[in-house]
Amino acid sequence: MVLKTILHKGFTSILALLVLFSTVSFTIEKHFCGDVLVDVSVFVEADKCEMEALEILQKKTCCKDEMNVVQGQDELTISSYDDLEFEQQQFLYAFTHSYIFGFESLEKHEIPHKNYAPPKLVTDIQVLDQVFII
């Protein structure tokens, strides 16, 4: 039973993270100085190298910036009850009605012998009558 609850919680967490990461967009920015990768950053601007200041003065470009944008899913559809077909609406109504009203509790019945205590035995009847099962 414990394994079942652990697996259930694990799978739901994985599915929640999958939905979260499929809808998040982010940018990976890389800064190269020549052919050497100097800095990689996610969500913020990459740090520039010291050669960048000299390039501005000399108007030469040996440094380059590369940006990779990872687009998340932005076409999430939110359906309403009116978007369903008539048969689907009928089934949904019948299912919810039977689920809500199908589990009514039974009325409590009085148990007449609930607190009945059997009489105390004064003597052993089998020994008194000399009747034994062989």
Image (spheres, helix red, strand yellow):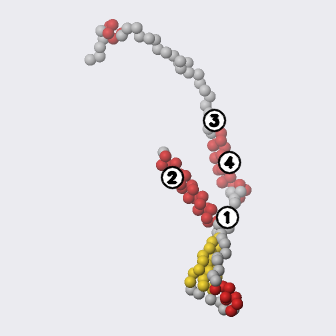
Q: Nearer the viewer, residue 78 or 14?
A: 14
Provide the residue designation for mark 3: 104
Dot in front, 2 or 1: 2
Dot in front, 3 or 4: 3
- Of callouts 3 and 4, which one flags the residue occurring earlier in the amino acid sequence? 4
Q: Secondary structure at mark 4?
A: helix
Residue located 48% across and 49% down the image: 3
- Of callouts 3 and 1, which one flags the residue occurring earlier in the amino acid sequence? 1
Marks 3/2: CA distance? Answer: 32 Å
Residue located 69% across and 57% down the image: 84
Marks 4/2: CA distance? Answer: 32 Å
Name the residue type under label 2: Leu
Provide the residue designation for mark 2: 7
Dot in front, 3 or 2: 2
Which quarter of the rendered picture does the C terminus lie within? top left
- Sort mark 3 into few (<14), some (14-19) or many (20+) by Cα contacts within 10 Å: few
Name the residue type under label 1: Leu
Marks 3/4: CA distance? Answer: 18 Å
Q: Nearer the viewer, residue 105 or 74?
A: 74
Marks 4/1: CA distance? Answer: 25 Å
Q: Secondary structure at mark 1?
A: loop
Q: Nearer the viewer, residue 116 or 112?
A: 116
Q: Position of residue 49 (x, y in %)?
A: 63, 82
Q: Secondary structure at mark 3?
A: loop
Dot in front, 3 or 1: 1
Name the residue type under label 3: Glu
Q: Position of residue 1 (x, y in %)?
A: 48, 45
- Of callouts 3 and 2, which one flags the residue occurring earlier in the amino acid sequence? 2
Q: Position of residue 111 (x, y in %)?
A: 56, 21
Provide the residue designation for mark 4: 93
- Of callouts 4 and 2, which one flags the residue occurring earlier in the amino acid sequence? 2
